[in-house]
Image (cartoon, grey):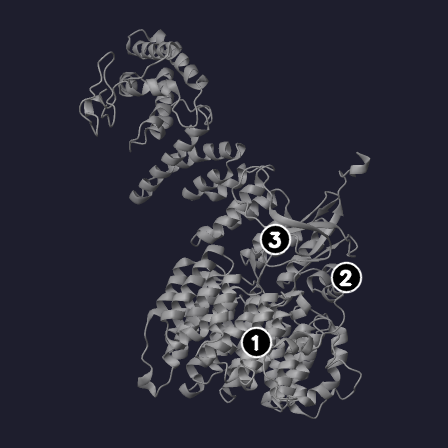
Amino acid sequence: MVKKEVVIPVPAADNAPMEEDKPLKKPPKELKDAPIQDELSEEDQELKSQLEMLVERLKESDTKLYSPSLETMKTLILTSTSSMTSVPKPLKFLRPLYSDMETVHDSWPDSTDKKFLADILSILAMTYDNEKLDTLKYRQIGSGNAIGSWGHEYVKHLTTEIGLEYSKRQEKDENSDDLVALALEVAPFFLSHNAEADAVDLLLQLDNIPKLVDFVDINAYKRVCLYLTSCVNYLESPDDQICLRAAHDIYLKHNKYAEATLVAIRMNDKEMVQSIFDGCEDPLLKKQLAFMLGRQQITVETEDEELQDCLNNTHLTTNFLQLARELDLMEPKTPEDIYKTHLEHKRSTGVQPDSARQNLASTFVNAFVNAGFCADKLMLTDDPEVTWIYKNKEHGMLSASASLGMLMLWDVEMGLAQIDRFLWSQDDNIRAGALLALGIVNSGVRNSSDPALAVLSENLDDSKTVLTRVAAIQGLGLAYAGSAREELSELLLPIVSNPDLTMELASFAALSLGMVFVGTCDGDISSTILQTMLERTDGQLSETFGRFMALGLALLHVGVRDQCEVTLETLRAIEHPIGKRAAVLVEICAYAGSGDVLRVQRMLHFCNDHIDTSSKDGSSEDDEFQAYAVLGIALIALGEDIGSEMALRSFTHLMHYGEPVIRRVVPLAIGLLCASNPVLTVLDTLGKYSHDNDVEVAVNAIFAMGMIGAGTNNARIAQMLRHLASYYHKDANCLFIVRIAQGLLHMGKGTLTINPLNSDRQILSPVAVAGLLTTVMAFTDVKTLVLGRHHSLLYSLVTAMYPRFLITLNEKLEPEPVAVRVGQAVDVVGQAGRPKTITGFQTHSTPVLLAYSERAELSTEEYLAQTPVLEGFVLLKKNPDYVEESKV
């Protein structure tokens, strides 16, 4: 038997024998369009002959034959069936006759029949793999029949050609109105056939997203808006804002005020937020909007007292304590309950002396662990003298008395009563701590009587000590973060601009202004800080506090994107290294949470340079901007999963090849990127860094472990920190940071989070970013600040602290326990039908705690939630259409 060596069978003319002796790689050109030699069934042969006969009729001179022939051809194409992998038979048999039909079309005069033939050529052109874009060409000169009359595949092919043609015309700067008009026919077809992503992609490619609003109906709006808002991370400005505005308009069109508010917050548009709030007429929904805005610490105008309470977060402390009672967490914890020193593997050398450094660590641990519970065993005792304060030395007493603010967090009335007695202390440190406590207790909540402003503003004048004034300034920043109150600008700007005051006072005043006016781009404050940088001497700017002046300027620009260009341009005029440092900080804050790849690359580029600092007396000032660039990589990638993963890879490379100044900051950047989100691989990485030869790397890695585990009670981190406590038991500084990390891990007994993302990780809180950045910046010079006399900067984390609860309330704002499913969030963008949004869920009764990557949904349809995202405070309304299963 002879073996056949056919590689590609060559199509031959009808009845001609196949040449099988020579293997051919490519069929000859003249045979390219020849009929395919197949063993056709009788039915197929009949169809093929019929189609050929119809084409022959079109070539004849009798015009009466044209219309019935074309009609028959259309019917045969439309009624043919095909599988997913094969071309419909009529198109397959007509393909070789395509050029003949083109010739016929060109020879006909303008008529209805000519347009009809163009329609058929348009669908036939799909089978031609050429660059002539004939499907589009013949569609435009055809009869203009319904866009979907040839089926879904035809419309998708046409869409591709529209996009290609549009790109060509844009390059030549030609008019594209005809293509846009055609796209506006295609988009409604896609929307009505569950292909929302295709409709959005097409209009996005043609720069016509706003037109989408008119086409989206009640059935498609959820999927369209989800896709639109998910595209934002991958778009450049201004396309990202255009997409968000379109989503906002679609939501408002369907009266979805809560969803529209979330989009307006993402756009950082206060006027839009106010207009949505004013436009909402449903009183219950308006309360829900007030809770959402309160969570983000956005103030809107309203005269309704009940709404004002929701906006001011007045309900936070009562509901948080209610949650604690539900979870049986009211019993105060001592630092020893957290340390579990009996589990630490170290050789005991008898009773440890009562060291001031250890007591200071216990002060912070006690403050973080019992934060918001209004009860502890060290500070809130019956003893009128509070002996614990005196177990700390000097500036340690400041942090100890300030811890009262953390313990009484959000409970302003009770907090004032506890703090008041220390405001009259003879000791400067205790009095300064009480002022800071007053700021901390007011953080995140607003009070109509403004006690913080009244008391703290009195302590800013020249007659007070620097220590007291700095504490009062810090307190104002924490109490009014994000409020943009003009009174604070009037109080603090003179301190920034006064050249006679120390750099410490001016810098902390700039930082507090940055926190209060975070993300507002306030021109007066920006220009004052810039002017101060220009006027101060090099020696003053080189002080370690200079970083906080630069940070204050940067915080004004959180999330403003390219609006920061004017400030960046001005900073280039500052010759001192602080100019470049401030420029990096401003840029990273402006693009915080944007996922902007180009900015991340720019920050990596800063880290590439090897800077020789030996020429300036061994000073490392010139390369400090590289440390901020590393933090920038984390801050920009925050909240975008792919970007975060890539950032973590970059940090590994920087740790291997970076300069010491870069290596020291990498753990802090990792902590910032994964705050309150203990990722296993990241924990292993930080575990290695915590034993690094460079003490600063090790200290920062230990603190980063605390940030990553903040409020999670993660057992793996707890074990690692106990091991580190044994490892560093002879190193007072490292042990101090280990204790701080243990306190953060058990923050709020496992009920709080410091992650700046909320509302299903869609929204970045500028106030939380301000607190996290301030704390992390304190660790960029850890020896002078945190391990020196400015450890009270650790309390800056308070602006990022918030309960990670879900509490359901009824129409009277009373807790309403309902069954909810809590599971891992699933990304359902672009998926057809109604896919499950959570997986691996468990059913609980509210209130419940939610981890970073978890999502909740109501178990039954008995109630209707007033917000699309079940987080924080959720208002419920009885579903009038609900019928209990027992009654069915």
Q: Indicate the position of residue 35 as horizontal and vertical percent values.
A: 27, 18
Q: Foreground: 704 or 308?
A: 704
Mark 3 or mark 2, which has the lower sequence index?
Answer: 3
Q: Secondary structure at mark 2?
A: helix
Instruction: Please identify, in this view, whether the residue under mark 1 or under mark 2 is nearer the observer.
Output: 2
Which picture quadrant has residue 20? top left
Mark 1 or mark 2, which has the lower sequence index?
Answer: 2
Q: Indicate the position of residue 591 as horizontal and vertical percent values.
A: 46, 62
Q: Is residue 398 above or below residue 71?
A: below
Using a 10 Å C-alpha cutoff, classify the residue at mark 2 as few (fewer than 14 neighbours), some (14 to 19) or many (20 or more): few
Q: Which residue is mark 2?
A: 326
Q: Is residue 639 above or below residue 410?
A: above
Q: Which residue is mark 1?
A: 512
Q: Is residue 366 above or below residue 843?
A: below
Amino acid type of the residue tagged 3 in the rendering: Thr
Residue at 43% in and 69% down: 630
Q: Which residue is mark 3?
A: 261
Q: What is the residue that sits farthest to the right in this orientation?
A: 887
Q: Is 438 left or right of 95, judged from the image as shown?
A: right
Q: Indicate the position of residue 487 as horizontal and vertical percent values.
A: 62, 74
